[in-house]
């Protein structure tokens, strides 16, 4: 693929897939490479690719684009967000100490707890919005500090730069899934690695499972991660990488619309008589609003949680009464989703029984407000 001027805005890099076109046909959309293995040239040298576990042309293309968006030195695409997280943990020495937020995506937390139960590591938690809480659990052997901001599903905001100042020699990994490159540049705030579930905002169409890691520190650990990805066979396959690239081309326009819709919905329900609380960092009264304003520079995202004045069963029923909000797990897609979170996570992770997690899409905001209003009224009025 040819490469045009890369000194461009992130919006242009995304929309034009970093200016890459097919040199054979001139196609403006990259061809899909589904090959598992790649033939060597007449001198028996590799032509840049060897075997799909090492990466494919489509995988490399989407990594190149993410580098442009994150302003990173390198990026790696995985076949899921969880496989990217597991790869990081696999590079840690046996028995090290890690610290994680007490409220975070439970899939990654479950894996960390599983490793702790096996004696592979020790685990401490901190309150995401409280740097003193983090400082209190740091140890001399702390090898990893995991930050997720905003956290899922309470959307608490963590000061990335503040954590970077406290982390000592630990690796700082920032899960920026719900604050993607349009709004947060975690590497510039002090993160060693930035992590994304590419399934969510980066793809935006609910048809790809993917994960990303990006860094500016090309040290031996980064090369070890590449080896882990190869040995685990978790490089993002060609077709999925092609779909992800398709989604990333519209990231910025999708993000802007989702943020606009979410702010309108959060503001509408913030003082609603049937709503106990709206958790959304874009609201001026939200506990994380000040920090979010500093490090989320292009909107506060499409994720929020609404806690109706309802029992657990009533809240679950509200989630079943919506017509436009689809009752499904995931986030960041063009379609709006609603989820009674405790039904998904269970009661072991501190989720309020009446919490409804909402992923706001790009539909008409007034239609979405009306849909939530009718569902809430159907159960509580």
Image: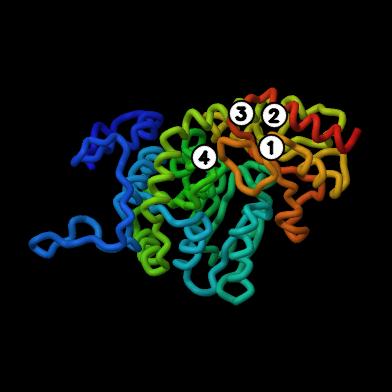
In space, the residues marked 4 and 1 are separated at their CA atoms by 16 Å
Which residue lies under the disc numbered 1?
Answer: 325
Please tell me whether mark 1 sits on a helix, a strand or a loop: loop
Residue name at image x 58 percent, y 71 percent = 115
Give how far across and how far down residue 353 sits, in percent. Answer: 81, 50
Marks 1/3: CA distance?
10 Å
Residue where numbered disc 4 is placed: 204
Q: Which residue is under mark 2?
A: 368
> What residue is pinned by disc 3?
363
Which label sits in the foreground, 4 or 1? 1
- Residue contact between numbered discs 4 and 1, judged by CB atoms under 8 Å: no
Q: What is the number of callouts on the image? A: 4
Callout 4 secondary element: loop
Closer to the camera in the image, 327 or 300? 327
User: Horizontal and vertical percent for residue 124?
Assistant: 64, 62
Image quadrant where one finds the C terminus: top right
In the rendered structure, are the residues bearing label 4 and label 2 in contact, judged by CB atoms less than 8 Å apart? Answer: no
Quarter of the image holding residue 281? Answer: top right
Nearest to the observer: residue 161 or residue 94: 94
Asked whether disc 2 touches disc 1, contact meaning CB atoms under 8 Å apart, the reply is yes
Among numbered discs 3 and 4, the one appearing first in the sequence: 4
What colouring does the structure picture have? rainbow
Q: Quadrant of the N terminus?
A: top left
Q: Horizontally, is 282 left or right of 72 in the view?
A: right
């Amino acid at each position: 693929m040819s490469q045009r001027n890369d000194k461009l805005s992130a919006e242009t890099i995304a929309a034009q897939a970093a200016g890459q076109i097919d040199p054979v046909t001139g196609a403006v959309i990259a061809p899909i490479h589904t090959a598992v293995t790649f033939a060597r040239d007449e001198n028996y040298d590799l032509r840049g690719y060897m075997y799909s576990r090492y990466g494919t042309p489509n995988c490399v293309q989407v990594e190149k684009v993410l580098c442009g968006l994150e302003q990173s030195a390198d990026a790696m695409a995985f076949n899921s967000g969880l496989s990217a997280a597991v790869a990081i943990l696999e590079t840690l020495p046996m028995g090290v100490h890690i610290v994680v937020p007490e409220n975070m995506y439970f899939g990654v937390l479950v894996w960390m707890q599983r490793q702790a139960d096996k004696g592979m590591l020790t685990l401490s938690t901190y309150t995401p919005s409280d740097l003193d809480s983090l400082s209190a659990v740091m140890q001399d052997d702390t090898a990893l500090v995991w930050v997720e901001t905003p956290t899922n599903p309470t959307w608490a905001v963590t000061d990335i730069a503040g954590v970077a100042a406290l982390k000592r020699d630990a690796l700082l990994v920032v899960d920026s899934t719900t604050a993607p490159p349009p709004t947060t540049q975690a590497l510039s705030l002090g993160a060693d690695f930035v992590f994304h579930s590419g399934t969510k905002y980066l793809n935006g169409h609910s048809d790809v499972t993917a994960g990303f890691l990006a860094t500016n520190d090309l040290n031996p650990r980064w090369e070890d991660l590449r080896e882990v990805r190869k040995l685990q066979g978790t490089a993002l396959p060609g077709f999925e990488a092609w779909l992800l690239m398709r989604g990333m081309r519209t990231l910025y326009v999708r993000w802007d619309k989702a943020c606009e819709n979410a702010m309108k919905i959060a503001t509408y329900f913030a003082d609603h008589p049937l709503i106990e609380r709206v958790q959304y960092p874009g609201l001026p009264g939200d506990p994380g609003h000040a920090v979010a304003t500093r490090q989320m520079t292009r909107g506060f995202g499409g994720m929020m949680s609404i806690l109706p004045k309802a029992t657990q069963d009533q809240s679950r029923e509200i989630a079943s009464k919506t017509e436009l909000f689809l009752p499904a797990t995931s986030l960041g897609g063009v379609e709006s989703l609603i989820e009674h979170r405790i039904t998904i996570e269970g009661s072991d992770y501190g989720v309020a029984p009446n919490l409804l997690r909402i992923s706001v899409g790009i539909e008409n905001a007034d239609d979405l407000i009306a849909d939530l209003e009718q569902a809430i009224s159907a159960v509580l009025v």
